Amino acid sequence: MSVYSWECLLEVSLSDRVVNFGYLSLNRLSDSVKTDRLALARTPPPCHAAAQAAGQSPSVGERRHTVRVIIIGATGTIGQAVVRAFEGRHEVVRVGHSSGEHQVDIRDRSSIERLLETLGSFDALVSTAGQVKFGPLAELSDADWAFCLSDKLMGQVNLVRVGLKHVREGGSFTLTSGLLARYPTKGGSAITLVNAGLEAFAKAAALEMPRGTRINVVSPPWVSETLEAMGRDGSKGLPAEKVARAYVESVEGTRNGETLDARDFA
Ligand SMILES: NC(=O)c1ccc[n+]([C@@H]2O[C@H](COP(=O)([O-])OP(=O)(O)OC[C@H]3O[C@@H](n4cnc5c(N)ncnc54)[C@H](OP(=O)(O)O)[C@@H]3O)[C@@H](O)[C@H]2O)c1
């Protein structure tokens, strides 16, 4: 399967196949298209620009006391930065897929159940995991769609469904989507569906969260380290350390049912 647009890499986790697709697609685009898209990725939204102009810092959360935070995807590019943002101030539990303190496969509900039974109760669960497939609508196979739905979409939804039994009063869930939810592009139909689905899910689930618990989604733009790993200019993206600030806001603040554009908190 081929890929037509470079934006597919916006969502890429660095698995071999997807990155290879991305390199191919990047080379197919004209420089003007690349420039437009990269400008989009680095341009702060109006609300962020207004806050910066007013000298305001990102909103101050209210859960500054030490809490127990489980990070799924803790060994990844964004996950490692999220770990650094919380460690020292909170009790952090690092979960990877093939590595990390603990392992889980979010595609497998029983794996999630085993993990959370083992770990016990928590105040916050943050997911920075979730893979997707990119490619032309006409070329995405049934297996590609099934992969996207079972991994990034239902994998994260199931973290919440299973996690509800274990989250403490006043706790939270923070999932990860991506900018393609709101900026669709050719070749990104599956990822736009998944990301928009996650954001819609959080909005609706927030209405039913029990015991004062909350749920939000963080939407990262290109991450600098990801661009650099692809041999691209990292300055066109947002450093993972800055992306992590949106996760801190979600966990320590009072938001519920929101999608946090990571550029707003950088
Ligand atoms: N990086 C970007 O530029 C960017 C931009 C927008 C959105 N996003 C989204 O942000 C999320 C994280 O991206 P990333 O770049 O940090 O990814 P990454 O570096 O590839 O890290 C992925 C993390 O998820 C874990 N993981 C992979 N498959 C899993 C599974 N089936 N079950 C549980 N954990 C699994 C990996 O564990 P192991 O290391 O043990 O395999 C790793 O900790 C993704 O959903 C991505 O779509 C990323």
Image (cartoon, rainbow, N blue to C red):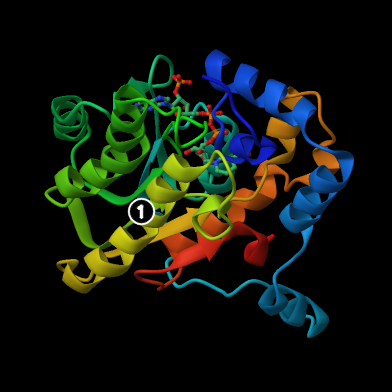
Q: Position of residue 126 (x, y in %)?
A: 39, 46
Q: How many marks?
A: 1
Along the line of sight, the residue nearer the viewer: 98 or 3: 3
- Tell me the quadrant of the picture where the C terminus can be found: bottom right
Q: Residue at x 51, y 63 (%)?
A: 260
Q: Is residue 118 above or below residue 160?
A: above
Q: Position of residue 42 (x, y in %)?
A: 77, 55
Q: Position of residue 84 (x, y in %)?
A: 58, 40
Along the line of sight, the residue nearer the viewer: 175 or 165: 175
Q: Is residue 146 above or below residue 257?
A: above
**In the visual, does 234 lie left or right of 217?**
right
Secondary structure at badge 1 equals helix
Q: Residue at x 69, y 28 (%)?
A: 25
**In the visual, does 160 lie left or right of 60?**
left
- Name the amino acid type tagged 1: Leu
**In the visual, does 21 lie left or right of 175?**
right
Q: Is residue 41 above or below residue 138?
A: below
The answer to which quarter of the image holds residue 17 is top right
Q: Is residue 128 visible?
A: yes
Along the line of sight, the residue nearer the viewer: 9 or 125: 9
**In the visual, does 243 lie left or right of 130?**
right
Residue extending farthest bottom = 54
Q: Is residue 15 visible?
A: no
* Disc 1 packing (10 Å; few <14; some 14–19; many ≥20): many
The answer to which quarter of the image holds residue 92 is top left
Q: Position of residue 235 (x, y in %)?
A: 84, 43
Residue extending farthest front = 138
Q: Residue at x 82, y 81 (%)?
A: 53
Q: Does mark 1's beta carbon lie closer than 8 Å to ligand 1?
A: no
Along the line of sight, the residue nearer the viewer: 123 or 244: 244
Q: Which residue is mark 1?
A: 198
Q: Residue at x 33, y 63 (%)?
A: 200
